[in-house]
Amino acid sequence: MNLKEKLKGIRSNISSAQEKVGIGHPVEIVGVTKTHPFSFIEKSYNSNIYSIGENKVQEAEKKFDSFKKMPKIERRFIGHLQSNKVRKCLSLFDTVDT
């Protein structure tokens, strides 16, 4: 099963759960790409996943240089943030979920 098929199933499950409990607000899927190569981010982006989560500032810095061809991408820091990496994190990420 490829990524697009998996995401179709996930979106279907989300939709079913929303119907079941009567929630209609949009749900955003965040693709967590830590330890995965940039090619995985490209596949995610091509599958309409525009929020990309990383938990390591140095790893993200290397990957994010390649985002220039992905105008819809949202860079999200997820997890624990060390105080000595705050400045770099704020310059790299659009949101911080910690």
Image (tube, grey):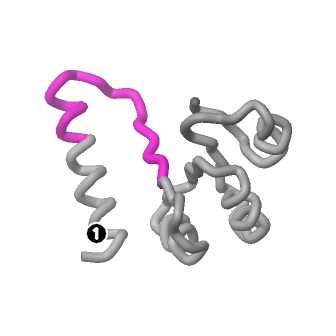
Residue 83: name its quadrant.
top right
Residue 15, percent across and down?
25, 41
Residue drawn at the location 41% of the way across and 37% of the way down:
27
Span colored in magenta? 15-31
The vertical placement of 68 against 90, above or below, is below
Task: Name the image quarter holding the C terminus.
Answer: top right
Task: Name the image quarter holding the N terminus.
Answer: bottom left
Please check the rendered image and state whether residue 43 is part of the magenta-colored stretch, yes or no: no
Residue 20: name its quadrant.
top left
Residue 14, percent across and down?
26, 41
* 42 displayed left or right of 21: right
Residue 54, percent across and down?
59, 51
Residue drawn at the location 22% of the way across and 22% of the way down:
22
* 12 displayed left or right of 29: left
Please check the rendered image and state whether residue 28 is part of the magenta-colored stretch, yes or no: yes
List the single residue furthest toward the left: 20
Mark 1 is surrounded, within 10 Å at the Cα level, by few (under 14), some (14 to 19) or many (20 or more) other residues, namely few
The vertical placement of 46 against 25, above or below, is below
Instruction: Report the amino acid beneath label 1.
Output: Glu
Residue 21, percent across and down?
18, 23
List the single residue furthest toward the top: 22
Q: How many numbered marks have been drawn onto this rendered protein structure?
A: 1
Visible in this render: residue 35? yes
Residue drawn at the location 56% of the way across and 73% of the way down:
37
* 8 displayed left or right of 36: left
Residues 12 and 98: in front is 98
Element class at badge 1: helix
Residue drawn at the location 58% of the way across and 35% of the way down:
80
Residues 80 and 19: in front is 80
- Residue designated by label 1: 5
Visible in this render: residue 51? no
The vertical placement of 95 against 93, above or below, is above
